[in-house]
Image (cartoon, rainbow, N blue to C red):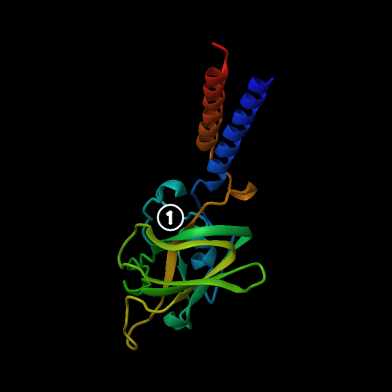
């Protein structure tokens, strides 16, 4: 009887450990909503930062981003001409609170001749994190590299209970104050989370791997505790 109890206890521990591994596994996700201070037209809407438009591969691989395009509904968020670039901001929201530690940003491609000039890229930026009560629960600032189509990662440390993230543009590549039309924006954004919920579940391969680990754990404990 004690042997059976021990076996059940150890198997239970195995499942707990596997569950913890599953819920703690880092997952790349995107926000559910995007609202910006302005956008040039529907081809340059803020939702283009969270819908994977222009990504040259699966989001989980953090692929490079395609060149600036207005085909279909476009693949970038670009501000309106009436917006001073350093007054621009975009807020991403989540349908359920998230625990996040990293943001991945794909800077504006500003490919001419579609772009008025090549300097739309964001330089310095600031992040503000809010909980479900719209209270500030964290801040971060960083600097994006110009003329890059790669995901740029910024780790701000684990923050739990995030319901929205505001991104403020503090400087852009084109510093001209006159004689040139100025715009700014972003290509895409994603986040690193250690919280898995129904709307951000692991992919099929990850689920299969966890099931395989469960079977191995059961086999291991059965062999270790079987009578000699």
Q: Nearer the viewer, residue 123 or 26?
A: 26
Q: Quadrant of the C terminus?
A: top right
| Observer-nearest of 73 and 151 | 151
Residue at left offset 59%, top offset 34%: 13
Q: Residue furthest front?
A: 2
Residue at 60% from the left image edge and 38% from the top image edge: 16
Residue 70 seen in the figure: no
Q: Position of residue 227 (x, y in %)?
A: 57, 13
Residue, disc 1 = 54
Q: Residues within 10 Å of mark 1 (few under 14, many from 20)?
A: many
* Identity of the residue furthest to the bottom in this view: 178
Residue 211 is situated, as x and y percent measured from the top left of the image, at 56, 30
Is residue 80 depicted above or below 217 in this figure?
Answer: below
Residue 223 visible at all: yes
Residue at 67%, 71% (x, y): give it: 133
Dividing the image into 4 quarters, which one contains the N terminus?
top right
Question: In the visual, does 66 lie left or right of 89?
Answer: left
Report the number of discs: 1
Q: Quadrant of residue 160?
A: bottom right
Name the one closer to the observer, 91 or 24: 24
Q: The residue tagged with tag 1: helix, strand or loop?
A: loop
Most foreground residue, 140 or 50: 140
Residue 44 percent across, percent down from the top left: 49, 67
Name the quadrant containing residue 23: top right
- The residue drawn where x is 50% and y is 32% is 209
- Looking at the image, residue 175 lies above or below residue 49: below
């Amino acid at each position: 009887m004690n042997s059976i109890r021990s076996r059940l206890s150890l198997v239970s521990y195995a499942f707990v450990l596997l569950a913890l591994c599953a819920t703690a596994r880092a997952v790349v996700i995107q926000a559910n909503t995007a609202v910006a201070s302005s956008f040039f037209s529907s081809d340059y809407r803020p939702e283009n930062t969270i819908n994977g438009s222009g990504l040259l591969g699966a989001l989980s691989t953090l692929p490079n981003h395609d060149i600036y395009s207005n085909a279909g509904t476009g693949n970038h968020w670009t501000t309106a001409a009436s917006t001073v670039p350093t007054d621009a901001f975009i807020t991403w929201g989540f349908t359920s609170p998230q625990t996040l530690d990293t943001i991945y940003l794909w800077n504006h491609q500003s490919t001419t001749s579609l772009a008025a000039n090549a300097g739309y890229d964001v330089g310095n930026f600031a992040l503000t994190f809010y909980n479900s009560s719209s209270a500030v629960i964290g801040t971060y600032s960083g600097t994006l590299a110009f003329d890059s189509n790669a995901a740029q990662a910024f780790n701000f440390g684990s923050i739990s209970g995030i319901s929205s993230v505001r991104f403020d543009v503090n400087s852009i590549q084109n510093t001209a104050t006159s004689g040139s039309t100025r715009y700014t924006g972003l290509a895409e954004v994603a986040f690193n989370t250690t919280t898995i919920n129904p709307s951000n579940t692991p992919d099929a391969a990850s689920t299969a791997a966890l099931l395989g680990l469960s079977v191995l754990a059961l086999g291991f404990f059965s062999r270790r505790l079987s009578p000699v």
